[in-house]
Amino acid sequence: MDWATLLNEERFFWPPDLTQAKRPEIENKSWVFQQDAARISSSSAFRRLQAKTQVLPFPKTDYPRTRLTHTIEVSNVGRRLALNVGRRIAESSPQATHLDPIDLTAKFVEITAAACLAHDIGNPPFGHAGEDAIKAWFESNFSGAPTFPKLAQASGDVLSDFTKFDGNAQGYRVLTYGQGWGREGGLQLSLAVLGAFSKYPRTSKFSERDKYGVMREEAAQAASVFATLGMQKIREDGVDFEFARHPLAYIVEAADDIAYLSADLEDAVRAGVIEFEQAEELLMPIAARSGYKGKQTEKMKRYEDLKKDEFAKLRYLRTHATTEMVREAEVVFFDKLPLIMSGTYRGEILRDSQLGDKIADIKSISNKEIHNARGKIENEIAGKNVIFGLLNIFAEAFETLLRREGLSNVTDLERKLLRIFPWDNYFSSEAEIDGLDAARLLYMLVDYISGMTDRYASSMFRQLSGHQQPFANW
């Protein structure tokens, strides 16, 4: 792979009426990626991250991180890491010698920052429990004798997108289809940002552990994006494919890991899920590593000066642990660069670093203590019931629409329920609804449910199921 191609600032979509002559001239190519970041952060899907679970659902205080605060932290870490890596590559990598070093570094930073802002934009309500709920609902209702026979007429390949539902694939769909001012092209982002965003550049047919990054409705245009970027194709079968990652996707992934590894521990201590001593024991070996510019003794003295202020100590440990993880990620990325550029690297930067064992310890404790905390499990069960309930309600409405062959044949009550669905996100007239097939309706159904925030989904389910009086304007 070649950096000049991988850092392509061309937009993957232009409105048909905006011919080449009418498109804006851009002198500073990095500005395109800054504009991508602005488009992402201005989107409604990004704003809704403020009310989606990061690790602790339905917190009683404003302190625990939401998906939005986590995302901002990821983007900040991504900028740091991309700046360090970009400078090193610009100075010493033969692949980058034909690019201006300042331009190369600036592109690294801006592409990575934008991709980091988008990295969780497709996550459903209730975090990873929401992903599991959507998969479980489709498995339950479309395996064997289907609960919704008309909707089950969608092909097995389409249903695979949902039985293996992944927020990464939904995120690609949000960026390229579900957002923006028009009904085509989504946010109309640059090719490079879409490539860096794509953690799993493959369709569900080639998924591993249910991880994939592109749904079938977007498969053709995604394949074109990845091919234009020069990403290495690993395999394909008809419309299905798998590409090697864009190199900057490894930086985005590492930034995500770095941001949540220490932050989740801090939130858990604040929430009383784990003890301060547990978090200290896990973060200290990383934060206090030797080689910190010869200032390890001074660093630890400053830590001890914080006395018994546990929360101040947590912030201190988290800050220095983040610095150490960024440094290690930079070393591994540069070390693995030949494999990454050839499309043959299959590892994870942090896992392959000298901190790999310590990071594995943090993940182990997080899975055992935080993700299995009673309160979190209870909220996740409630979230699963909410998602199951909403999918049942709207799937039944869509099933009726298909069975009655159009809106004109449904009852008044059925029509009222269907009117709740945001059809205007997709169509300019009601007449277009009658021509929809099962596959199209299922993608739209998952768009709607996965786009909800935790509280909105819970509130809507309570209202539609009769457990809460619906809100009104009068």
Image (cartoon, rainbow, N blue to C red):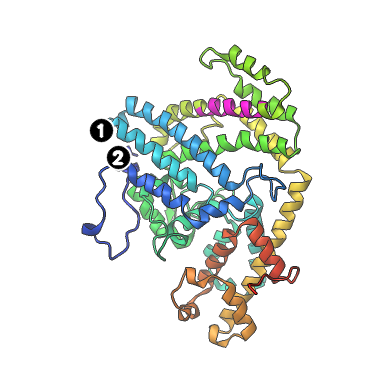
What amino acid type should be assigned to the residue bearing mark 1? Answer: His
Circle on res. 4: 2
Left or right: where does residue 261 sit relative to residue 307? Answer: left
| Residues drawn in magenta | 313-326
Q: Is residue 269 above or below residue 198?
A: above
Residue 377 position in % (x across, y down): 75, 49
Foreground of the two, 53 or 211:
53
Residue at (66, 27) in percent of width and height: 312
Circle on res. 98: 1
Q: Is residue 230 above or below residue 85?
A: below
The answer to whether residue 238 is seen in the rendering is no
Residue at (54, 39) in percent of width and height: 73
Give the structural element (helix, strand or loop) at label 2.
Answer: helix
Foreground of the two, 63 or 101:
63
Q: Is residue 467 above or below residue 170?
A: below
Residue 372 position in % (x across, y down): 74, 43
The quadrant of the rendering that contains the N terminus is top left
What amino acid type should be assigned to the residue bearing mark 2? Answer: Ala
The quadrant of the rendering that contains the C terminus is bottom right
Q: Main secondary structure of the magenta part?
A: helix
| Tag 1 and tag 2, C-beta contact below 8 Å | yes
